[in-house]
Image: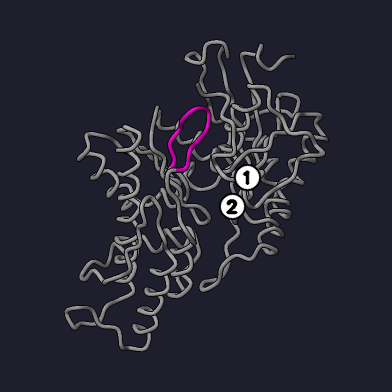
Amino acid sequence: MDITKKRRRIALGCEGSANKLGVGVILHEGDLSDPSSCTSTVLSNVRHTFVSPPGTGFLPKDTAHHHRSWFVRVAGRALADAGLSPDEIDCVCYTRGPGMGAPLTSVAVGARALALLWGKPLVGVNHCVGHIEMGRAITGASHPVVLYVSGGNTQVIAYAEQRYRIFGETLDIAVGNCLDRFARALEISNDPAPGYNIEQLAKQGGRVLLDLPYAVKGMDCSFSGILTRVEELAAQMKAGQGKGPDGEPYTAADLCFSLQETVFAMLVEITERAMAHVGSSQVLIVGGVGCNERLQEMMGLMAAERGGSVYATDERFCIDNGIMIAHAGLLAYETGFSTPIDESTCTQRFRTDEVLVKWRK
């Protein structure tokens, strides 16, 4: 049956671009000729995370092995939680990129196998577009400036003429990668996530704001210099030589506090500039770092001064998940898009503005 004629449309999405393996099932209902009548319902959203030891990152080969080991169990549970059989699925969606090559490939192979086994169309999805569309669906933000912040990406985005246009981005490493690598320097636990543990530690700091490089260049940011400097300060602290501007020793909590305050101020600045440029009063924060309550608070203060508002989701949808891939993939599939099996590749570099967003006016 023609997908555009169906009033109930269901997709299964598979995500595995980094250390989170996620599979989710989403339901779209309504007449596609009347978009205002269409609704989205999350039927299941299952995730399993590869956690490496403190002081280490997650290597592509180990992460890929984790995804291969857990894919069948996670996909089976997602289908069971949704209460559906494979016959009721309209399409299988997977993350085509960007991300880490080996984990992406492992999940793409799993998604491809499901599509072939069930005889369903396959839909390759841009990871960032998945974050944006899930954020819009959950929060109801209509025309926001999007701040996409994660372990692999940092971008300020706004929609125009069927593209998500990138107004600013990192010039080197992502803000999430900066936080993750600093967590390794302090040997902070990676469970449940290094960024989350830095956030909790930062709440205990604040006695002093240490001077760190502030690198905003137009609409872009740089985080490598601030990481180098804060790692140097951490080494001095461990050697018993670290002292703040008041002459008193600073703590790991002070370092976490100072790092967060500085990098988040940089993100607020470029986001505000993008809001002024496009005339938007809404900010939508997506990506794993978007869970950070201090970032949300700082962005909220800026938006309130402009008479605007901030939209964000909780960890179910901010952190990488399969449901966002299912949702964005189904939106694309409803416009007639699908990915032939012999073209179902992955790419570590897949820019947000490469995607034609045909489902938006």
Vertical order, 271 against 222 (above or below): above
* Residue drawn where x is 43% and y is 63% of the image: 179
- Amino acid of disc 1: Glu
300 or 138, which lies in front?
300
Q: How far apart are labels 1 and 2 at the CA level?
A: 8 Å
In the displayed structure image, the side of residue 34 where residue 11 appears, left or right: right
* Residue drawn where x is 69% and y is 54% of the image: 67
11 or 283, which lies in front?
283
Q: Where is residue 163 shown, x and y percent of the image? A: 52, 33
Magenta region: 157-166
The disc at residue 15 is: 1
Q: Secondary structure at mark 2?
A: strand
- Amino acid of disc 2: Lys
* Residue drawn where x is 37% and y is 73% of the image: 230
The type of colouring in the image is one colour
Q: Crowding at label 2, few (<14), some or many (≥20) Cα neighbours within 10 Å?
A: many
In the displayed structure image, the side of residue 149 where residue 95 appears, left or right: right
Judge whether residue 158 is colored magenta. yes
Vertical order, 252 against 257 (above or below): below
Q: Where is residue 223 shown, x and y percent of the image? A: 42, 63
277 or 85, which lies in front?
277
* Residue drawn where x is 48% and y is 43% of the image: 316
Mark 1 and mark 2 residues within 8 Å of each other at the beta carbon: yes
Q: Secondary structure at mark 1?
A: strand
Which residue has dot 2 on it? 20
Q: Where is residue 226 shown, x and y percent of the image? A: 38, 68
State the quadrant of the N terminus: top right
